[in-house]
Image (spheres, rainbow, N blue to C red):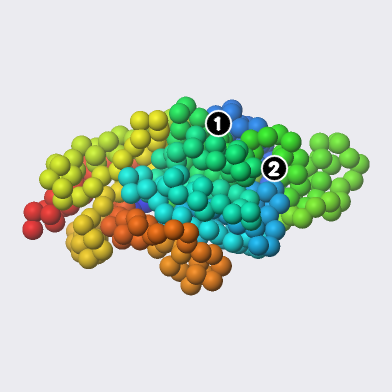
Amino acid sequence: MINFNVPPYIDTAAGYINECVKAQKICGDGQYTKKCNEWFEKKTGTGKCLLTTSCTHATELAAILCDLKEGDEVILPSYTFVSTANAFALRGAVPVFVDIRPDTMNIDEKKIEDAITDKTKVIAPVHYAGVGCEMDTIMDIAKRHNLKVVEDAAQGVMSEYKGRALGSIGDFGAYSFHETKNYSMGEGGALLIKDKKDAERAEIIREKGTDRAKFFRGQVDKYTWVDLGSSYLPSDMNAAYLYSQLEVADKINEDRLSSWDHYKTRLQTLADDEKISLPYIPAECKHNAHMFYIKCKDLDERTSLISFLKQNEILSVFHYIPLHSAPAGQRLGRFHGADEYTTRESERLVRLPLYYGLKPEQVDYICDKITEFYAK
């Protein structure tokens, strides 16, 4: 069986985790948490990086930093994971969904401005498949309307838009290190903070609303409860697992890109024959091969293809059910404008196996079976 995903593992991870155990420092903000934070700050150029327990929690932290209140509105795509909307809805904000572009599956930047009201406080673009949204346009809209931008860059580690790291362009950016991501700590995430003036409050929120980080740095003689907060701090053992991958981040990235390019080459003929559609990468974007997907003609064809691949020992999956069609989405949010592409394109998309260490012959086998399916 060719699995859809295999979490990345680097041999140095076990030794790093053992270091944490021997040092009796297995809670958060140990040496490996700090090393990961510093790595991302250097790599992305962000003002501050804080490792978190998940991308969900990183986005929740950003929502608190945006001072969202009951009735405020956040503009985002409906084609995204539930966490993007949940993080803001938990603050009492209303998710306002707009349509996506069919080429990148990202939020349609041309639909955003019309959705803005006097209650809008945040735009939350989602960089689907590690391919950047049209961030220049989004940042211009935000500036003109005095809005915050929170990038959901869960899939975007090592990706860029016009030379800038995804997650580092808006006011805040959230990364995911779930086991399905390019770099993993099992469960985990990170918040990128553009302006260092927001970093101190972010540390407080992340540490249950206390100024504990200041205490450990010797800046105060005791720590206390000073703000809203929660426990968003991951174990240093998780960070140690992640750091082993960051040390060879380029190697992992190149391996995934090689598989992605192999898929693209092998499946191009089917695309040329208009049997399937392949991913589109805008010229200004540098992607990270987070996923390789194809688009079938419609939902029925996709269902048949996934079943056929499974019969041939290949696990492929579809992706999000649009949030505006979900019970909670209908109750907590609303769709602005026409759903021209969100539902239609989501029903066509199939994600193929892609992970660090996927062999070329496995990609060939998968492509052979897809070709066989369409030959029938």
Instruction: Give neighbour class at mark 2: few <14, some 14-19, many 20+ (Cα, 10 Å).
Output: some
Q: Nearer the viewer, residue 68 or 263?
A: 68
Residue 249, image x, y percentages: 46, 33
- Look at the picture and state if 151 lies above or below 342: above
167 left or right of 277?
right
Task: Report helix, strand or loop for mark 1.
Answer: helix
Identify residue type, mark 2: Asp
Q: Is residue 132 above or below residue 89?
A: above
The residue lying at 69 percent from left, 41 percent from top is 30
Residue 332 visible in the picture: yes
**Residue 356 spot, x, y in % from top left:** 37, 41
Do we see residue 33 in this rendering? no
Image quarter in which the N terminus is found: bottom left
Depth-wise, is mark 2 or mark 1 nearer the camera? 1
The Cα–Cα distance between marks 2 and 1, rounded to whole angstroms, is 20 Å
Residue, disc 2: 29
Q: Residue at x 54, y 64 (%)?
A: 333
Residue 25: image location, x then y, percent? 70, 45
- Write down the residue under mark 1: 44
Judge from the rendering whether residue 34 lies leftward or rightward of residue 248; answer left or right.
right
Quarter containing the C terminus: bottom left
How packed mark 1 is, by other alpha carbons closer than 10 Å (few <14, some 14-19, many 20 or more), is many
Pointers 2 and 1 in contact (CB under 8 A)? Answer: no
Q: Which residue is found at the position 38% from the left and 60% from the top?
A: 339
What is the tally of numbered marks visible in this picture?
Answer: 2
Seen from the viewer's position, the closer of residues 260 and 163 is 163
Q: Quadrant of residue 197?
A: top right
Q: At 26% across and 52% down in the image, what residue appears?
A: 295
